[in-house]
Each structure stands twice: as C-alpha cells, then as structure tokens.
Image (cartoon, rainbow, N blue to C red):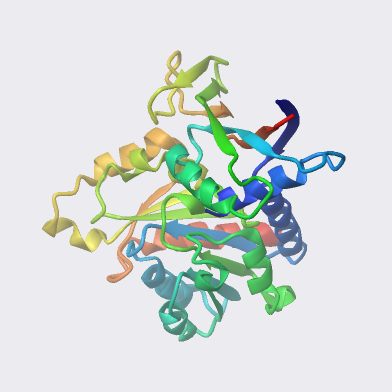
Amino acid sequence: MKEVKVVRRVLDANETMAEANRKRFSENNVFVLNIMSSPGAGKTTLLEKTLEAIMPDIRTAVIVGDICTTNDADRLAKSGADIVQVNTDEFGGDCHLAAHVIENAASGFDLANLDLLIVENVGNLVCPAEFDIGENARAVVLSITEGEDKPLKYPLMFRVCDVALLNKVDLLPHLEFDIAQAAANIRQINPDMPVFETSSSTGEGLTPWLDWLKQKVADKKS
Amino acid sequence: MGIAVQIVEIAASSIPPDIENPSVERVNIKVGKLSAVVPQSLKFCFEIATKDTPLEGASLSIEEIPVTTRCRPCGHQQTLTSPEFKCASCHSGDLDILSGRELDIDSIELAE
C-alpha cells in the first residue's frame, strides 16, 4: 500500500468562495447577516417585522433559501426589499446554502445602493453552521416551542453565531418552557453572545434586536 | 452528502498522475467532534459518492479529533468532554478553540 499525503480542508473550495463574497460585499460597505434556525422557528415572520421596521432607511436585500416553494419570498416581497429565492432542490436538495449559491443569488443586486443583505438560510441547525457564505455575522433563532436543551444538542450552531433570538415568547404562558435555562444553555456554549427574547408575531422585544442590527449596519458604513 | 462529494473530488484529484490504473483502497480523514458531521452518515454518503469514480470500493477511515480549548485570561488548556465552554481552572467562558472543528483529508492509500 502506498500512502499519498493530501492534507487539505474538505470545504476549501467553499471557504475560498466565501472569502471572495465577503470581499465583494465589504467593498460596497454592505453588512451581510446569515440567519439560521430549525424549520418553523419563525425566521420569515421575524424578517417580515424586521424589514417593516428598517425599510426604506436601511436599504435591504434578502436571499431566502428553501428546498422547495417560493412562499417565503412571496411573504417578504411585500416589504419592497429586493428578494431572491434560492430553491436548493435545483442544487440537489441541499440542507444549507453554500458560498457559490450566494454568489449566484447576489449577482443581480445593485450592491452600491445596498446597506444590508440578509440571508435566510435553509431551516436546519446542523449543516448551515459548517458552511461560511461570506457573511459578517450570524444569528440563530430558537423558538421556545423547541425545548431549552437545543443549544447543548447543536453546540456548533450556537458557538459560531454572534447573536441569538429566543422567539415566540408570546407563547410562554401556554408552555412549560424555562426561558432562563434556555438562555443559560446558550451562554454555556457561547458566553458573550447577546440573547434577545422576542415575539415576531406580537412585536414584543424586537427593539433590542433592531438596535443591534442597525448598529452593525452603521458600523459597516463608518 | 455535499461533504462526501467534496471528499471524493479532492481525493480523486490527489491521485499521482504517473500511476497507471490507480486503485484507491482507503481515504484517511480527520473530523473534529465539534463539526457537523456524523461519521456513520458520512461513510454511507461516501460509498454512494464514490460510485463510478476512481475511488469506487475505497473505504473511508475517520479519525475523530477531540475538542480542545485554551483559556484567554489564564492560558489553561483542556479537552472538553461535554459542550460546556468554560475554563476548568478560572471558570472564564472566553476560550479559543484549538481543535475539534477539523474536516480535513489527511491522505489516500493506493494499492501497489
């Protein structure tokens, strides 16, 4: 048997492409946020409310990843933001968005006249954590119907993110969910991460999240 | 599955061009415990991804790499056995990850 040394990162190609994306977005001072969660955590409703609050002051475009359907893009288009829907079905039903998909999806945007690009990743707490797409920050949305222990079950996701949202807090009276324990579990994985308690449907708690986002966009401009 | 396809692509392109009818018997990879990869699932996908490639029939050998960290404030190094990012010495949560995020192809083994 003859052994040939290789020593290469498996995701080399993706990381090279992600760096190229990041450079292109940065040259145009566009802040790029990658939002991830499990399916049904409320990413799209959160984005609807977010776009309502920041448009048109912050010129925003959105890339929405789903395996199938354009339902999310249809909902978000009402805000007036540029929306591109990526159906990963055409790319083999992938459970995440890879850097080359973002490059392709962003090619139609007028980056010079954009402040913020939000990528709504495919609903999944596993694979998207592994794939850099050229973003500046990552957000994870955990809905309180999912259980307090999710951060401990998906540590990579909560480790690689910069901000966490505990969403659907309007349902707290109806559930046996220990929100302090959930926040503690997140901090066990990522002690310095800001954790916002939000309800996308009632609008409760959205202000600190919007302030965080606006600050990031402003920092990118300065 | 995308990861398995990438492994096959990189391994196939690493076969030395001067070998006639190369037969890859094994691909050795390193997978960090903190990576989003389940070894059993990756092996299953690898078998499918190698069909009709120079790697068909090759086995995938996975070395799992533990999660090790270094504490920024006190410098203490440790191996994490559970997902609790806290220094065992000074209890700070400000840790650098030294290993555990690997997803690397180390080598390929060819039949003589």
Asked if residue A113 is positioned above or below residue B43 in the image, the reply reads: below
A218 on left or right of A3: left
Nearest to the observer: residue A131 or residue B84: A131
Nearest to the observer: residue B106 or residue B19: B19
Residue A214 x %, y %: 54, 63
Residue A80 x %, y %: 52, 85
Task: Give the mark count.
Answer: 0
User: Residue reaching furthest right?
Assistant: B18
Residue A105 x %, y %: 63, 73
Q: Quadrant of residue A123?
A: bottom left
Asked if residue A135 is positioned above or below residue A115 in the image, the reply reads: above
Q: Residue at x 55, y 73 (%)?
A: A90
Q: In which quarter of the image is residue B18?
A: top right
Q: Which residue is drawn at 53% across and 14% down?
A: B76
A106 on left or right of B90: right
Q: Residue at x 60, y 50 (%)?
A: B50
A40 on left or right of A156: left
Q: Residue at x 63, y 66 (%)?
A: A102
Do we see residue B36 in this rendering? no
Image quadrant in which the C terminus of chain A is located: bottom right
Asked if residue A78 is positioned above or below residue A174 in the image, the reply reads: below
Residue B48 x %, y %: 52, 52
Do we see residue B25 in this rendering? yes
Image quadrant in which the N terminus of chain A is located: top right
Asked if residue A21 is positioned above or below residue B37 in the image, the reply reads: below
